Amino acid sequence: QPVVFVPENTTDSFEEKGAYADSTLFNLIGMKFISGDASSVFEPQYSIVLSRSMARKIYNEEDPIGKGLIHEGVIYQVTGVFEDMPGNTSFQFEWLIPFRVFVEEMKKVFNVNEWGASWLQTYVELEPGVDLEQLNEKLKGLAFRKAGPACESIQIFLYPLNKMLLYGQFKDGIETGGGYIKTVSLFFLIGVLILLIACINFMNLSTARSQKRALEVGVRKTFGTKRKHLIRQFLVESGLITSIALLLSVGLIWLSLPWFNEFIGVQLSFSLLDPTIVTGLVAIGLFCTFLAGSYPALYLSSFNPLTTLKMQKVSKGGSAAWIRQGLVIFQFTMAFILICSTFVIYLQIQLVQKRDIGIKKENLVSFPATEELCNASSAVRNELINTGVVENCGFSASPILKSSMRTNPWYWNGKDPEDDAYISFNFVSEGLIDAVGIKLLDGTDIDPAKKNNKGGAGILINETLAKRMGREGRVGGQIGQSPDHKWEIVGIMKDFVFDDFYTLEPASALFFYDPQRTYILFVRLKPDIDTYEAIGRVQTVLRSFTPYHAFEPTFMTDRFDDLFEDEHLVEKLSALFAMLAIFISCLGLLGLSAFSAEQRTKEIGVRKVLGAKIIDILFLLGKAYMVLLLISFVIGIPVSLYAANHYLKDYAYRITLGWDIFAGVALLITLIALLTVSFQSLRAALNNPVKSIKTE
């Protein structure tokens, strides 16, 4: 989590991400210390170790050991400096503070020894030879054995860290096969398809130019060259072209990588010193050589030498033409599917982003809430509202969007014994629901005047939880975490989407009044004011309570967009690959149409002499390709429909697939293909017919 530190005896502030950890983590993940002893850096109660980058950022070339960093009024002594964590590790932090400090803070909020708590991450290094599946079998029911019925539904299990990022998606403790592996597999498949499209271009153009190589093949065969030698020659030619293409691609990667990293928002690296990359390039080169070169080699080496030496045409359609047409259909089918998929992803993201989530994101800004602010929540609210730039404000323990605070069990009168679903909860102050724009359907906001240690201020529940509670889900009803200790419901909130934006029904949620347990201050700015001036006024008020804090703002609209970062990445890459696929396909179409026009030069000349118009010539040369496009659409529509439904199946809140998507994509590809074919056809149609007739 990002935390603001102020170097002792200065007014500077630095915000960096870090973590609370045990010293055992150092050896577990192989951290390298530049300064300080890993075995003793956490001995002082309030100690902190910094990354090389953070130490240099704060202290330049000075030795940071022994210096103090202030956070939340506590001075942390710098006891060590470690090497920056690699970019490809799951452990990304700039500072570490002893875990015991965090535990002491959490004790103020809840019982840290509860087996149902999920607020920490535990990493275990197994002894060599330990069977993970057998160990997980032993862990089954551990929470129930330790804590009883309250944790009956909780399962504790271990999972390999090297699989976590790609495969670590679970439902009820069972691996679902989700995670980033779905995205990686998707784009690997797309990459292979685009490579196939490029190889098809080479195959089509090689066989289309077969007439020009026929005489060479005939002469070589006449002088005793065996077919296998001809096949080897054509494969070598294919390999040379592939090698040149690989060299050019390496150069393009180096040139475009900075732009590509900025485009996708991920820092990728490319080095020919990496054995994996070199192996991959060699594998791709061999794959393209044999795939793209095999069919032309077999086809060209099969020519009859007597036919070719007599200068007769070696092919007048037949199987070669059918294969070329089939490959063109395959190309445009793949392009059609990719473009349809891109549109589906885009429309799905737009649907969710425009969804009414029950929270007003505009003009809503959040700030980190220090202990001083939380302890004086009412005074802070009054000061902020008196600035004249704030409509309302309130404190929250949850970021509202993508909240992960939930627990079980809960009790109310008339509860179904089979109902063991979790309920999301939040600690708030007065004014929070107005600040974030949550509507009250019934009752009132929490009244701090009624506050006491037993939750006398009452609680708010959302309408989903009210329906779930039945007759007890009303103003005046009661709910609690034990049968003997319940709180009174003072208000029913309209449902707001705070967890999964793709669900049809929001999860159950309730709000407690306890500003001292909050961490975030939400401020709704007045519309039609200078945002930066307003934020400056808000920061001035907050710093009057906590002078050492920077109070960097987070706009809720930006946070909402950030929640769709992965979806936007898939959308961007899909669009890029779709454009690349249609571009490569059209390059092949351009080459084929050029050869087609060249082969029919005399026919075009004769037709023009007989009175054919340019539009007739364009139709003559383009109709065959339009038929191929139509076939590719007929094949591509059901495949695209299946792929789209497969992508959308995990989303309850999803777009409705209509024919307008497929018709629009088909029209787009048709227009691009028509422009491509028309370019060469128009050149042929505009040639002098006298010169055209003389060509043969």
Image (cartoon, rainbow, N blue to C red):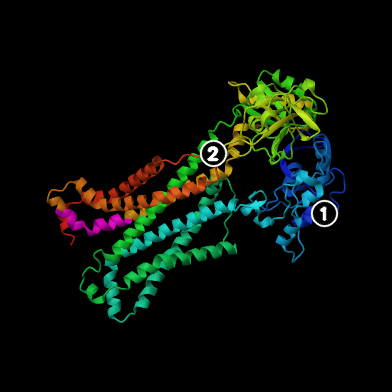
Give the percent coordinates (x, y) of residue 15.
Answer: 72, 38
Would you say residue 387 sits in the magenta stretch?
no
Q: Secondary structure at mark 1?
A: loop
Q: Which of the two discs, 1 and 2, labels the residue nearer the N terminus?
A: 1
Give the percent coordinates (x, y) of residue 658.
Answer: 42, 40
Q: Disc 1, disc 2: CB below 8 Å?
A: no
Name which quarter of the figure residue 524 lies in: top right
Task: Look at the image and tell me whether residue 338 can be seen.
Answer: no
Examine the rendered structure and indicate whether residue 350 appears above or below residue 235.
above
Rendered-image quadrant of the C terminus: bottom left
Examine the rendered structure and indicate whether residue 431 appears above or below residue 93.
above
Residue type at numbered disc 2: Tyr
Name which quarter of the figure residue 109 lies in: top right
- Provide the major secondary structure of the magenta segment: helix
Rendered-image quadrant of the N terminus: top right
Q: Farthest right residue?
A: 44
Q: Which residues are magenta?
A: 591-606
Q: What residue sits right under mark 2 in the picture?
A: 653
Q: What residue sits right under mark 1 in the picture?
A: 38
Q: Residue at x 65, y 56 (%)?
A: 163
Q: Farthest left residue?
A: 610
Choose between 508 and 560: the one closer to the eye. Answer: 508
Task: Look at the image and tell me whether residue 290 can be seen.
Answer: yes
Q: Residue at x 75, y 43 (%)?
A: 119
Give the percent coordinates (x, y) of residue 104.
Answer: 84, 40
